[in-house]
């Protein structure tokens, strides 16, 4: 029952197309398509066979016509010979007839005058006698058969036998005219041979020799140079499509093709024409070679990679080195092409350098920009060195430092020795400019720097994170110092092929380039150090200003300290200078961690900080105005406290082993000014102040007291070291600012930190705290 119900629910079987019918329909359609395709293929086969048959027929017809043309040419030559022989027979017949007429006249007894007249009216003049006619006929036959060598020998022989045929004498006989015409035909044949595109060098030399023998040396020389130029163009056209596959080395191949072609042409010219004997030919070779050099420079420019890539820089360096080497090799042949090549190629190299350094600025300072070449060089040694500073600073700034060294080293590695020789100063100037931009970039990340100050081209690309803590700021200084003191010298040593000497006596110092081996480095090193000084001095100034001014903008280091407060019996420095000592201690601890292994930089920074405090005090006019005000009473104790504070600052530098002489000099200026002011107000320093030794001892005692208050054991160790430092003097305590050589004059200027920053310092010193951001050295404050 259930099966019957299901059958009732199914649609009628008549409405369904059987599968067998579908298969038969598709099979029939497929067979029809295959048959139709086979028919078309057979038709195509017939058409191809017909076309091949036509081609064979036409080819056979072409061969038959070619054979007929050759046979016709032979028949023409035979016909010419037959005509010449018939002409000779006619001449013989006419000569015989003339002799018979002469005999007849003599036998008839004609007088002498009639004989002379008959001779004058002779239609066969003497100048067309048999030998000359035979010679002309012989030359015609040789020219018709294109036997240029035999024709040339015959013409030379005839000219030797008949000197009147040479030159441009007034003789215009019919024989000379006929001879000149044949000579012109031979010259034309030689020119056609030399101008053939497929002519070989041997055939060209053969034709040129013939032209020289015909007196057409200038034409032959021009054809020789044209042939070498044409063959060079063909070889270069065949090579150019492969330039894109070898962007670094294609200029080497091009220069080899061009200069080897110039050398061959010059040698052939000398061999054929004797350029030493004829300066006109050598001058033409030089002019032609100069045009070929211009062509080479144009080819390099047109087929090089984009100028902003390192591929273009490498190609330009390789081309420069190879071409100048080839130019030097051509000088013995009398071809002086070096100066011309440099004049033509220098603008291109300068353009490539400029665009590469523009790309470098974009990659370094726009951290959103990527460069595949930098990713490939991530295994460089300096990456690990600079990455150490990423622990204590924002990774953005560390990435900037790594990118700086990566791209600078990438650019330097593209330079060849000859490129350094000719463009070294230009490269150094651009590296200096890039490093200066890099320093400005780091300064922009320090507190107190307005966003609109400097580097306007970077404002739309990079948002910097402020280096708020001492460790972050010291990391920036450490990265910049490492680049200047270690990484750049190593890169320059490799490229400049210079000797290296260690910066330290123990052999562990940074590499120092020897100035005598690269004089152009001297000024560059000085400017590089001055650029780093901008960052260092800005850091020191901001640190000191954050110490001097409170968050509310009030000055902690006020003249009221020396006008109203009474010194205690412990003879300690004033509170601001005690705070300075504590803050410098904290900063030294942080610097020891962040700048590990950079003791030289640590001492430089801390010495400069103590120096900056005294310089600020010396230039702060508001501070001195209070002492100069007649209405303000002065006390000898205030002068004593001020002198003690200055001595205390000097002793801080001496105790820590910093270069303290500069600090001492600035402190002396402050002390002398204070003594002069107090003396003018009626206070006698000689009677009211202790001896100079007292201030030194009091400052040392104060340092010991401050240290004793923190850690007994540490105090004893520091005190012993302090005593040793005092006994040894400044000796080992003196250091030099980062140098990439041992230039004495520059080392002295860096050691004393006498940098040209007084203008900027005075502007900050006179500013109020309202114009500055709040102090940001949270490490030391915490």
Image (tube, rainbow, N blue to C red):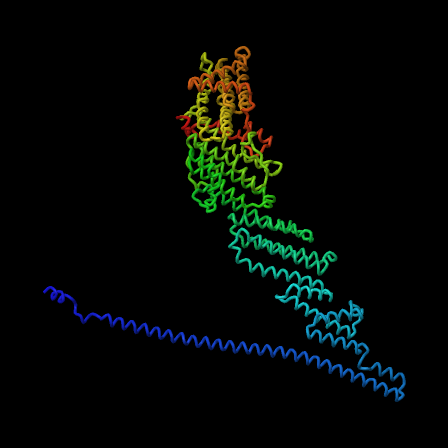
Q: Quadrant of residue 730?
A: top right
The vertical placement of 180 against 306, above or below, is: below
Q: How many marks?
A: 0
Q: Quadrant of the C terminus?
A: top left
Q: Is residue 589 left or right of residue 298?
A: left
Residue 385 percent location from the top left of the image: 47, 36
Q: Nearer the viewer, residue 642 or 183?
A: 183
Q: Is residue 617 left or right of residue 31?
A: right
Q: Nearer the viewer, residue 269 or 113?
A: 269
Residue 98 percent location from the top left of the image: 82, 84
Q: Quadrant of the N terminus?
A: bottom left
Residue 104 percent location from the top left of the image: 86, 88
Residue at image point 75% right, 57% down: 277
Residue 478 percent location from the top left of the image: 48, 33
**Residue 628 visible at all:** no
Q: Is residue 288 left or right of residue 53?
A: right
**Residue 427 visible at all:** yes
Residue at far left of view: 1
Q: Quadrant of residue 661?
A: top right
The vertical placement of 342 against 589, above or below, is: below
The vertical placement of 333 against 417, above or below, is: below
Q: Nearer the viewer, residue 176 or 326?
A: 326
Residue at far top of view: 687
Q: Quadrant of residue 585?
A: top left
């Amino acid at each position: 029952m259930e099966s019957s119900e299901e059958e009732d629910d199914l649609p009628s079987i008549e409405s369904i197309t059987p599968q067998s019918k579908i298969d038969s329909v598709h099979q029939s359609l497929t067979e029809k398509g295959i048959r139709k395709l086979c028919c078309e293929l057979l038709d195509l086969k017939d058409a191809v066979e017909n076309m091949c048959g036509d081609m064979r027929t036409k080819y056979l017809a072409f061969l038959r016509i070619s054979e007929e043309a050759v046979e016709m040419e032979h028949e023409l030559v035979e016909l010419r010979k037959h005509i010449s022989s018939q002409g000779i027979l006619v001449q013989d017949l006419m000569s015989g007839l003339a002799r018979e007429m002469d005999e007849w006249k003599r036998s008839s007894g004609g007088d002498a005058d009639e004989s002379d007249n008959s001779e004058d009216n002779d239609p066969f003049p003497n100048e067309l006698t048999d030998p000359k006619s035979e010679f002309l006929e012989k030359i015609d036959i040789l020219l018709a058969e294109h036997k240029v060598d035999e024709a040339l020998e015959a013409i030379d022989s005839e000219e030797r036998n008949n000197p009147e045929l040479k030159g441009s004498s007034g003789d215009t006989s019919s024989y000379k005219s006929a001879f000149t015409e044949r000579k012109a035909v031979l010259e034309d044949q030689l020119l056609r041979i030399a101008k053939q595109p497929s002519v070989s060098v041997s055939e060209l030399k053969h034709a040129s020799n013939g032209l020289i023998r015909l007196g057409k040396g200038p034409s032959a020389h021009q054809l020789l140079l044209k042939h070498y130029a044409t063959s060079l163009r063909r070889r270069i056209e065949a090579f150019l499509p492969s330039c894109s596959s070898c962007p670094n080395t294609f200029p080497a191949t091009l220069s080899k093709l061009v200069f080897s072609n110039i050398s061959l042409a010059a040698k052939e010219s000398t061999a054929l024409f004797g350029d030493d004997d004829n300066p006109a030919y050598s001058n033409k070779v030089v002019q032609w070679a100069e045009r070929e050099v211009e062509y080479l420079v144009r080819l390099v420019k047109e087929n090089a990679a984009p100028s902003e890539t390192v591929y273009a820089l490498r190609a330009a360096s390789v081309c420069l080195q190879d071409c100048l080497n080839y130019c030097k090799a051509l000088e013995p042949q009398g071809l002086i092409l070096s100066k011309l090549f440099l004049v033509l190629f220098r603008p291109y190299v300068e353009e490539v350098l400029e665009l590469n350094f523009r790309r470098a600025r974009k990659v370094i300072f726009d951290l959103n920009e990527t460069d595949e070449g930098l990713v490939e060089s991530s295994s460089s040694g300096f990456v690990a060195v600079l990455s150490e500073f990423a622990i204590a600073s924002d990774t953005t700034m560390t990435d900037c430092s790594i990118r700086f060294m990566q791209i600078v080293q990438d650019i330097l590695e593209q330079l060849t020795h000859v490129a350094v020789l000719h463009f070294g100063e230009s490269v150094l100037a651009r590296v200096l400019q890039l490093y200066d931009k890099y320093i400005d970039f780091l300064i922009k990340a320090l507190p107190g720097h307005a966003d609109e100050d400097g580097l306007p081209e970077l404002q739309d690309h990079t948002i910097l994170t402020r280096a708020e803590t001492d460790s972050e700021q010291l990391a920036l200084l450490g990265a910049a110092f490492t680049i200047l003191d270690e990484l750049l010298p190593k890169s320059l040593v490799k490229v400049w092929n210079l000797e290296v000497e260690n910066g330290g006596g123990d052999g562990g110092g940074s590499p120092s380039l020897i100035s005598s081996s690269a004089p152009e480095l001297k000024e560059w090193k000085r400017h590089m150090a001055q650029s780093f000084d901008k960052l260092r001095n800005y850091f020191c100034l901001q640190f000191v200003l954050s110490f001097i001014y409170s968050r509310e903008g009030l000055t902690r280091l006020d003249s009221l300290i020396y006008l109203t407060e009474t010194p205690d019996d412990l003879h300690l420095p004033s509170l601001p200078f005690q705070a300075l000592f504590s803050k410098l201690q904290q900063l030294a601890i942080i610097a020891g961690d962040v700048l590990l292994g950079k003791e030289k930089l640590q001492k430089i920074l801390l010495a400069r900080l103590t120096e900056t405090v005294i310089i600020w005090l010396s230039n702060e006019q508001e501070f001195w105005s209070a002492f100069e005000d007649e209405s303000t009473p002065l006390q000898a104790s205030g002068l004593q406290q001020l002198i003690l504070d200055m001595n205390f600052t000097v002793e801080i530098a001496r105790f820590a082993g910093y270069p303290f002489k500069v600090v001492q000099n600035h402190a002396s200026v402050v002390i002398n000014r204070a003594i002069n002011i107090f003396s003018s107000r009626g206070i006698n320093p000689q009677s009211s102040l202790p001896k100079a030794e007292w201030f030194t001892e009091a400052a040392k005692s104060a340092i010991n007291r401050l240290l004793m208050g923190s850690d007994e054991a540490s105090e004893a160790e520091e005190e012993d070291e302090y005593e040793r430092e005092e006994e040894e003097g400044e000796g080992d305590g003196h250091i030099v600012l980062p140098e990439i050589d041992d230039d004495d004059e520059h080392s002295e200027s860096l050691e004393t930190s006498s940098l040209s920053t007084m203008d900027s310092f005075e502007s900050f010193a006179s500013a109020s705290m309202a114009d500055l951001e709040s102090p940001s050295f949270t490490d030391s404050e915490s």
